[in-house]
Amino acid sequence: MTVYPKNLLEDGFEIYMMKTVVNRENDTITLLDRLAAGYFIVANLAQETSGYTIGRESARQRMTIWMDFWGGKTDSMRQYLEVRTQGKEILQAVVNSEVKNPTMWLRIGVYVIVAVVICVLAAKAFGH
């Protein structure tokens, strides 16, 4: 069983609670777990009805995960956390390779120079 590191600031309360549930040794569902699941079901339902398309899909998926948990199943929660962890690792690997690439730093330098030139020209054009 994979143990997921918890960080409330990085993960947010919902993912933190998912990790807390999945990291437990036993599969008991406490009253606090039921209250949290109820809250997240309602919160994700509200986001599903009022959010953007991508947010709605994510909210629908998380709502289904919490409904499964309410029924005593944690398989979908484990799968969601595993996919999320893999995605985070892939993104970190891409960022690390980009940071080591000198072309990226050159590109950022060019963007900064262009932005400064545009600001200076705009200031001169408007007389400031």
Image (cartoon, rainbow, N blue to C red):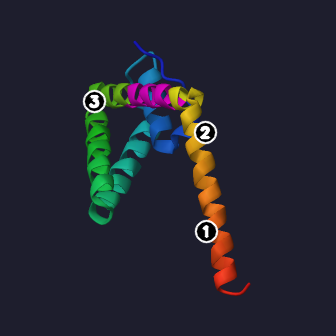
Q: Magenta segment: does it hold 86? A: yes
Magenta segment range?
84-95
Neighbor class of circle 2 (other Cα within 10 Å; few <14, some 14-19, many 20+) is: few
Disc 1 on helix, strand or loop?
A: helix
Nearer to the camera, 17 or 106 = 106
Q: Is residue 77 above or below residue 60?
A: above
Mark 2: amino acid: Trp
> Which element type, helix, strand or loop, lies under badge 3?
helix
Can you say whether 86 is above or below 18 in the image? above
| CA gap, disc 1 and disc 2 | 20 Å
Q: CA distance from mark 3 to mark 1?
A: 50 Å
Of callouts 3 and 2, the N-terminal one: 3
Residue type highlighted by circle 3 = Ser
Residue at 74 percent of width and 84 percent of height: 128
Q: Is residue 79 magenta?
A: no
Q: Which residue is mark 1?
A: 118
Question: In whole angstroms, how far apart are the C-alphas of marks 3 and 2?
Answer: 41 Å
Q: Residues within 10 Å of mark 3 (few under 14, many from 20)?
A: some
Q: Quadrant of residue 122?
A: bottom right
91 or 32: nearer the eye?
91
Residue 62 placement, left or right of 121: left
Q: Is residue 8 visible?
A: no
Q: Position of residue 125 (x, y in %)?
A: 64, 83
Q: Is residue 52 above or below residue 14?
A: below
Q: Residue at x 39, y 40 (%)?
A: 34
- Asked whether the residues under the numbered discs 3 and 2 touch, taking CB atoms below 8 Å apart as contact, a structural biologist would say no
Tag 1: amino acid: Ile
In the picture of the structure, the residue carrying the numbered disc 3 is: 76
Q: What secondary structure prevails in the magenta region?
A: helix
Q: Give the label on residue 87, or none.
A: none
Which residue bears the numbered disc 2? 105
Q: Position of residue 50 (x, y in %)?
A: 31, 66
